[in-house]
Amino acid sequence: MWRRFTALLFVLIIITSISSFAFADDVDSSKYQVILPKEEASAYKNKVLLISGQAPIGTKVSIELYGVVDLTGSKYSLVNLPKKEDYTLISTIDVESGPLGFAKEIELIRGINKIIVNFNVEGIAPIERIVYYYEAQQIFETLKNSSVIPTAN
């Protein structure tokens, strides 16, 4: 009789402990973030951009770079962004988070770049950043050819 009671008690303890482990699987989303670039949409004149963030040690982070080919530089801007299907995957970089987080330099293409940081953790949505890369000479020529600024005769 005591053996049956002990066996039943042991089974109940195991069932109770298994169900409590299932609730301990919640993910703290504040541990997963992108630090640089800060803004959701920004412009840069440097061809190389540092992507950095925080994630628990050992997290496999993938950084995807998408771009839009716009040879004239006049079709798209931060105000007039391309449609999702207009982007082309340029590169994918995998990095592992360490004690200080993660960081990786990526080379941008001229124009609109979409960066998607995926933490590969269930319950954590990928983070997206839009970066407009321009060359200073391109800005001068655009202003020079613009009808907004009068030219000296």
Image (cartoon, rainbow, N blue to C red):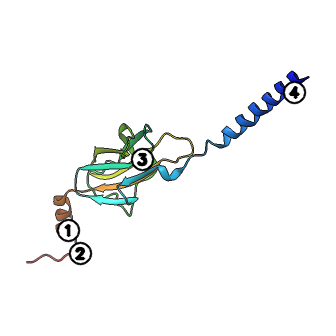
Q: Earlier in the sequence, mark 1 or mark 4?
A: 4
Residue 38 in the image: x percent, y percent? 37, 59
- Who is closer to the viewer here, 90 or 39? 39
Inter-mark Cα distance, 2 to 3? 36 Å
Q: Earlier in the sequence, mark 4 or mark 3?
A: 4
Q: Earlier in the sequence, mark 1 or mark 3?
A: 3
Judging by the rendered image, the residue that carries numbered circle 3 is 116
> With respect to residue 78, does 16 lie above or below?
above
- Who is closer to the viewer here, 153 or 106? 106
Label 1–label 3 contact, CB within 8 A: no
Inter-mark Cα distance, 4 to 2? 89 Å
Nearer mark to the viewer, of 4 and 2: 4
Judging by the rendered image, the residue that carries numbered circle 2 is 148
Label 2–label 1 contact, CB within 8 A: yes
Nearer mark to the viewer, of 2 and 3: 3
- Label 2 is placed on what type of residue? Val
In the image, taking residue 89 as reference, residue 45 lies left or right, namely left
- Label 3 is placed on what type of residue? Ile
Judging by the rendered image, the residue that carries numbered circle 1 is 143
Judging by the rendered image, the residue that carries numbered circle 4 is 5
- Label 1 is placed on what type of residue? Leu
